[in-house]
Image (tube, coloured by chain):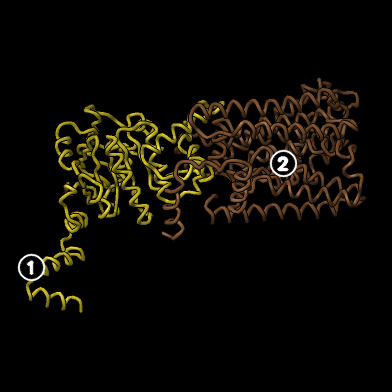
Amino acid sequence: MTASSVSPAATMTAPLLSLRGITKSFGAVAALTDVDLDVAAGEVVALVGDNGAGKSTLVKVLSGVHAPDSGTITFESEEVSIPSPAAAQQLGIATVFQDLALCENLNVIENLFLGRELRGHRLDDVRMEVRSRELLQQLSAKIPSVRAPIAALSGGQRQTVAIARSLLGDPKVIILDEPTAALGVAQTAEVLNLIDRLRERGHGVIMISHNMADVTAVADRVVVLRLGRNNGVFDAETVTAEELVTAITGASDNAVTRRSARRRRGAAGAPAGVTKEGTDDE
Amino acid sequence: MSDLDTVEAVAPAAAEFDPDRPRGFRGTLTVLGERFRGGDLGVAPVVAGLIVIWTVMQSLNPIFLSSTNLVNLAIECVPVGIIALGVMFMLLVGQIDLSVGSISGLSAAVTAVLFVDQGLSPWLAVAGAVLLACLIGWLYAQVFNRLGVPSFVITLAGLLGFLGVQLWMLGAKGSINLPFDSGLVTFAQLQFVPPWLSYALVAAGAVALFASGYARASARRSAGLPATSTQALLLRSAVLLVGLGAAVWYLNRDRGVGWMFVLFLGLVLVTHYVLSRTKYGKSLYAVGGNVEAARRAGINVKAIYASAFMLCTTLAAIGGVLAAARLAAANQSSGGGDVNLNAIAAAVIGGTSLFGGRGSAFAALLGIVVIQSISSGLTLLNLDSSYRFMVTGAVLLLAVALDSVARRSRASSGRA
């Protein structure tokens, strides 16, 4: 992957979107405190953290649902405010929420163009179908037919349609909220391929995930949030699952670190390690 | 995830990008067969039901399929059919209006009072009644959107309330006759399309169907999309020409096609266009399918609900006025009895789903023809309304059961 060498440089020169010192409280609860985040064009940033770490709040700040109490958002080197979801769309920040928000009774084309149909009084379905096919082909999406109702599609295919829909507005940054949750193995692979393709197209991607395997498979950088604060930025190429889990939970003693510690000892071939492992298992 | 999903994820790879549909007649049959098994029944069950009902009724009484009876049947369909068209809008957004009967009765009363008692021109009286109904729909929508009261309850209150207003307007007399020579009554009772014009309309319809299909197919072809072949388009238009032509010829042996029925057909066609070819139509389906998705797509969900409420009450008023015109009177039982449930039943029997997001303009047309056929057939057999209620009830249950089963098999075959 060339991305790992590209991304730090890109981040340093001109991040597409950059958050500095974002703070947001709901009454007495501080959801975000002094959070920084950068995304460059053609970079996939994974945002990880435990439940309640502030990932969703951060996404809502970016998608215009919540306004931050303080901090700055810089988009394409200009300081901006994102007061509403429509403003986020206009800037070029698209969000695909976890529940996808597709209408199962409508087909793929109708869902892609829902709310922004071409020629409202006499639908231009030829142009909409052509656009839909082009878009899905660019994403190498495996959709049986653009005329198929959403109900006929698998979870991964629905995710693809939801992502494709966010691309129609030609966004620069795409935020994916748990894109692989609730998907099977093959479908997860499909969606991860899709995220790779988004990077190739030069979009900045922010991906929220709980799945460390997915994160290390597709992300360039991993940003960890813990209790509403930054808790480290890692290079996805070199980071290990245990480092991430440690950063997420704040505890260095857990099942993941124990097992990898055992493995390391086992690899060293120390007989003491073997007996230790044996006693551990009993 | 289940095996089903894995299979689905793999299978499309082979069939990717467009076998849109297999070609030719055999291909069409295959596609239809797959759709049926998948629970996408379309209008097939209604048409099948209609054939059964007509066969049974004809064998019981040979007058049933006579030109005279069918002319009457067609005209009788119109008032409740138009109301059913309105109900279909409500069902499409996943709501229901139980007050259509009362609204239609109230509109009949308002028309009669304005026209006969107040001496206004009949068309002004009709406009007043329709406007009032439109206002009632707006009021329903305000209560629904602002207070979040379920449509079921709002319109149940409306059912009682507006029945009261209707009785109050008609006063002690309880009935107002409309003069027989008024344009309103002659339109509903006596005006038929001249034979030459009826054939011309059929021909125009067939030509229009072919022309629009051809324009669409060539636009698709020039965009590199699969399109219906010209032969298939010609065949479709020819079938329409022959079928409708024969029907019109048969009706013309008696009085012919009533203008009122043409009005109904016109409303159905306009509704069909709006639902299938406009942004507004797609919004209705979207709101019925997934409100939250519709909201996030930037659709003004409240406005869509309001429009459905208003269209429903407006069409109910038009139906009510036509019913009064046909009877040449507005009385206390206008819009009462089975009007309400027949209208809702017609929409459902025709294939509009009670679960929202599924239905078409032709549902109302086919549904009301089924209901009127039962009613007319049983009347011809000199059976009183007790049997009519029982049979209609059974057919309604059958239709809803079919809807539920189809929905389940859609869910299992992933077509929902």
Identify which residue, B167 or B66, lies in the foreground. Answer: B66
Identify which residue, A2 or A249, lies in the foreground. Answer: A2
Q: Is residue A92 above or below residue A192?
A: above
Q: Is residue A212 above or below residue A27?
A: below
Q: Going 44% across and 56% down the picture, which residue do you hit? A: B7
Residue B313 occupies which quadrant of the picture? top right
Query: Could you tell me residue A219's position as x and y percent?
Result: 24, 46
Q: Going 18% across and 59% down the picture, which residue do you hit? A: A242
Count of marks, rendered view: 2
Chain B, hue in figure: brown
Mark 1, secondary structure of its residue: helix
Query: Could you tell me residue A18's position as x and y percent?
Result: 22, 35
Q: Is residue B62 above or below residue A71?
A: below
Quarter of the image for the C terminus of chain A: give it: bottom left
Give the foreground label among 1 and 2.
Answer: 1
Q: Mark on residue B161? A: 2
Residue type at mark 2?
Answer: Gly
Query: Could you tell me residue B124's position as x and y percent?
Result: 77, 21
Q: Mark on residue B268? A: none
Task: Give me the chain that's yellow.
Answer: A
Residue beneath disc 1 = A268
Q: Chain of mark 1?
A: A
Q: CA distance from mark 1 to mark 2?
A: 86 Å
Q: Going 23% across and 39% down the picture, which residue do you hit? A: A43
